[in-house]
Image: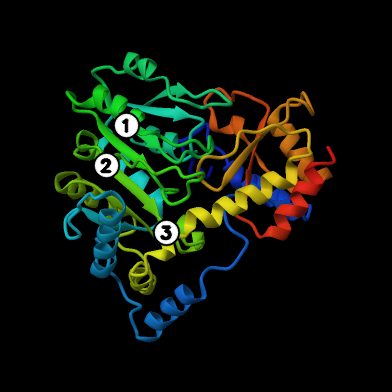
Amino acid sequence: MQIKPVISSKLPNIGTTIFTVMSKLANEHHALNLSQGFPNFPASDELISLAEHYMRRGLNQYAPMTGVQQLREAIAEMIEDLHQVTYHPETEVTITSGATEALYAVITAVVRRGDEVIIFEPAYDSYVPAIELNGGIPVYITLEAPTYSINWPKVKANITDKTRLIIINTPHNPATTVLSQTDLQELAGIVKNSNILLLGDEVYEHILFDGLKHQSLCTHPVLKERSFVCGSFGKTFHVTGWKVGYCLAPTELSAEFRKIHQYLTFCTNTPVQFALADFLKNKDNYLSVPAFYEAKRNKFLESVKNSRFTFVPSMGSYFQNLCYSAISEENDCDLAIRLTKEIGVASIPVSVFYNRKNDYKTLRFCFAKDDETLEKAGEKLSKL
């Protein structure tokens, strides 16, 4: 009798991501896809031309494992310009194949079996699988709608001698909130006399609204010395398919990070790195991003202002949460599916970002779309 190989799943409770599920459903029903977080408008012609330029120059082979030197230098200059903080481009800046790779590499580098990792939920869906694959134990701090503010005494109460890492996401996806200087001070007070490390998921660092300033972990000296800060050019420059991100960390932490990175992807798209390095020379290419997306947010909110949805305007990221408690008692997953099929607008149910599937009757919509799409979506949603 032939024996068939059987795989014992390392992630038995993990299925296909909600982003894939809702995008597939949107395609099947020809719905406006405001679920998955990607723009439906073109990237900069200049940036695309730069990438083509370097491809035609023949820079199409492996990049250095740590990233093209010119891009690492450009990132260090950008961070110093924005935050007056210094990272050495040779030893403290690493280019990655998207921020998701950077997040995984950080967790793999520092989390060992039995270590506890504090995450704030609703949480981006790549955190917990990475923690569990490395034998770590996720410790959930629940942020409740509609404010999604962090209860710092609760965080302190959950610190144990097994706490190894705290994951901070600001601007937050999907809560759409941002941390303040007070939040950073509270966090510093908790970790300053410990061996706890920090992972900053800051991929929406340039997408904040209403005059808010991004409070990066690197801006506080106590936090900077123990932080891995991860960013993404895909989010900033509307090129999510290019999958280019980066990780900033002190030299000793970067050295451990790079040990993992080199065996995940080794290196990242070479001509695109050169293109991004040139594109960053013009500061307006990233300084103009907040106003661009604030206009998108406002366009979407204007389109739904006469609907029965309620909302707190997004503080950051390119997502907007809408509460539908005045419209339906359905759970958010069922409603998200129904709206995709019946009215042709796809969204993400926020409950999927909670360990216990907390249902606050809230859907997340991506407003990184052209104005026509946002207006059509608002018109459809306003009929509910």
Q: For residue 219, which numbered disc appears in the image?
A: 2
Query: Does residue 164 appear anywhere in the picture?
Result: yes
Which is more toward the observer, 306 or 384? 306
Name the residue rendered at 80%, 41% in the picture. 382
Mark 3 vs mark 1: in front: 3
Residue density around tag 1, few if under 14, some if 14–19, many if 20 or more, within 10 Å = some
Amino acid carrying label 2: it is: Thr
Q: For residue 287, which numbered disc appears in the image?
A: 3
Q: How many marks?
A: 3
In whole angstroms, how far apart are the C-alphas of marks 2 and 1? 9 Å
Q: Along the polypeptide, which appears first: circle 3 or circle 1?
A: 1
Q: Give SS at disc 1.
A: helix
Amino acid carrying label 3: it is: Leu
x%, y% of residue 199? 32, 38
* Image quadrant occupied by the N terminus: top right
Mark 2–mark 1 contact, CB under 8 Å?
yes
Q: Give SS at disc 3.
A: helix
Query: Does residue 262 appear anywhere in the picture?
Result: no
